[in-house]
């Protein structure tokens, strides 16, 4: 495998695209007893319309998540039980644009890795097992429908995007999953779970050649075609409406405010992410004047934060947390975004830049963060280990421009969840 040393951050990464088309990354951590494997698919809840065998298929919301649940079934048992019996802590998740299966262990790493590769690449569905899962996922759906955080978040996405499928819950509705059949699951697996549409990342004191050998021996030899996805043409905001309010059983109102960012080519994604994180720290970071003012007046809770999200080709800034007066907080964010443009914040910018470098370096100690960032970088076409270099390149002007272009009152949208 090829090796690349990132001397400025002390990381060594082995990388190879195997003959079967699978990208493999091994982030070397000498001396660590723990190892982590992360097998991810470039497929999530928003990928509902796609082309397979020359035909366009429309699938119901929730099918990617449903498939994730069913992938642990094997003809001779359940993969989770096998992994647990071999000392691994294993799980999986589905987001709007990714499905990932992962485990950590301190022993039997190769055996667990082979189990992971086998069950993810070998679908096994029966009418009985698919029907049984419908009840289990139905309970999960009802829990999310009762979640104020879920209601607030997806309420915001529905304001920000008119037709994009990421507006809909990743788990779907009870009516959505009622349509799912074993054949649909096989079609989705055959389309998306191909070597060229997946990535394997391993972090730990693990032999890179062993990882590559296991992937070559267990996974299909065919590379597979890159899936063609369709998110629709109209991603404009859903009209003149700028706010929405839901009444639920909450003790304190919740605020979800957001603004869309421009689409950028792959080579600029990392720069956009870093610029956004610096902008958010300046604007609403815990040491910022706005945060301290809102918190001291009891308008926000300690959990209030701003974050950058990039989902299924769309990028956005989102502000969320408890707020005694969501509308007043959203207005304060827009006012601060306007006033900061007339200030000389170069000193604060350099301070936040250093803090952001420290945060990025700390992420390198989290095996789960490293794996997730490697997968996102692979799917979106950038190198996450270049984040520190990208940080050195951003300027106060680029941060100022992002704040100015994104957070004006007419662009910031607000979803609030208030007590009944």
Image (spheres, rainbow, N blue to C red):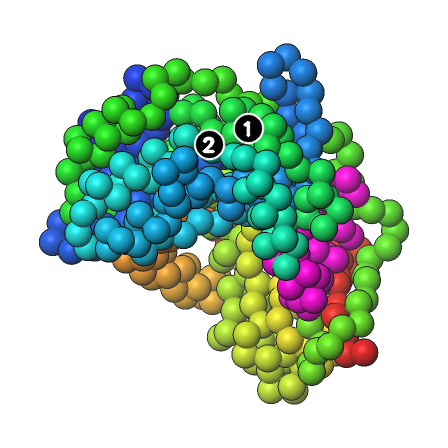
The disc at residue 186 is 1
> Of residues 382 and 101, which is closer to you in this image?
101
Location of residue 70 in the rendering, given as x and y in whole percent from the top left corner = 51, 42
Magenta-span inclusion, residue 142: yes
> From which residue to which does the magenta span run?
140-169
Location of residue 316 in the rendering, given as x and y in whole percent from the top left corner = 62, 50
Look at the picture and state if 18 lies above or below 38.
above
**Distance in Å between CA atoms under marks 2 and 1:** 7 Å
Going from N to C along the chain, the mark reached first, 2 or 1, is 2
Identify the residue at image location x=16%, y=55%: 33
CB under 8 Å between callouts 2 and 1?
Answer: yes
Residue furthest bottom in the image: 297
> Of residues 267 and 122, which is closer to you in this image?
122
- Classified by dominant secondary structure, the portion drawn in magenta counts as helix
190 vs 51, left or right, is left
Residue that numbered label 2 is attached to: 123
Residue furthest right in the image: 240
**Which secondary structure lies at badge 2?**
loop
Q: Quadrant of the N terminus?
A: top left
Location of residue 115 in the rendering, given as x and y in whole percent from the top left corner = 30, 39
Identify the residue at image location x=81%, y=78%: 420
274 vs 334, left or right, is left
**Mark 2 burial class by Cα count in 10 Å: few <14, some 14-19, many 20+:** some
Location of residue 16 in the rendering, given as x and y in whole percent from the top left corner = 27, 26
């Amino acid at each position: 495998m090829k090796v690349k040393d990132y001397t400025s951050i002390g990381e060594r990464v082995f990388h190879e695209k195997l003959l079967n088309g699978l990208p493999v990354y091994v982030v070397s951590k000498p001396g660590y007893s723990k190892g982590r494997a992360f097998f991810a698919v470039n497929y999530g809840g928003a990928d509902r319309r796609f082309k397979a065998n020359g035909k366009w298929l429309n699938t119901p919301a929730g099918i990617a998540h449903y498939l994730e649940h069913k992938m642990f079934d094997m003809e001779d048992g359940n993969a989770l039980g096998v992994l647990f019996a071999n000392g691994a802590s294993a799980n999986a998740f589905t987001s709007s644009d990714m499905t990932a299966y992962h485990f950590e262990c301190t022993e039997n790493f190769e055996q667990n890795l082979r189990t992971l590769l086998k069950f993810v690449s070998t679908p096994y569905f029966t009418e009985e097992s698919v029907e049984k899962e419908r009840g289990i996922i139905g309970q999960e759906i009802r829990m999310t429908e009762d979640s104020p955080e879920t209601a607030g978040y997806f309420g915001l996405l529905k304001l920000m995007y008119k037709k994009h499928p990421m507006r809909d819950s990743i788990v779907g509705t009870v009516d959505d999953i009622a349509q799912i059949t074993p054949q649909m699951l096989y079609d989705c697996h055959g389309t998306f779970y191909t070597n060229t549409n997946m990535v394997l990342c391993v972090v730990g004191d693990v032999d890179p050649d062993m990882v590559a050998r296991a992937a070559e021996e267990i996974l299909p030899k065919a590379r597979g075609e890159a899936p063609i996805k369709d998110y629709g043409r109209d991603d404009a905001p859903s009209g003149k409406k700028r706010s929405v309010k839901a009444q639920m059983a909450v003790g304190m109102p919740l605020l979800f405010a957001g603004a869309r960012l421009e689409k950028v080519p792959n080579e600029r994604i990392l720069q956009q992410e870093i610029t956004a994180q610096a902008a958010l720290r300046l604007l609403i970071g815990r040491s910022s004047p706005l945060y301290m003012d809102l918190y001291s007046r009891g308008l926000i809770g300690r959990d209030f934060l701003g974050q950058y999200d990039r989902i299924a080709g769309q990028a956005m800034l989102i502000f969320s947390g408890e707020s005694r007066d969501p509308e007043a907080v959203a207005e304060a964010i827009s006012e601060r975004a306007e006033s900061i443009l007339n200030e000389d914040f170069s000193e604060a910018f350099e301070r936040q830049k250093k803090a952001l470098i420290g945060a990025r370096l700390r992420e390198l100690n989290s095996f789960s963060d490293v794996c997730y960032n490697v997968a996102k970088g692979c799917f979106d076409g950038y190198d996450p280990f270049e984040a520190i270099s990208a940080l050195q390149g951003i300027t106060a002007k680029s941060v100022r421009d992002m704040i100015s272009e994104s957070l004006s009152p007419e662009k910031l949208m607000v979803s609030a969840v208030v007590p009944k």
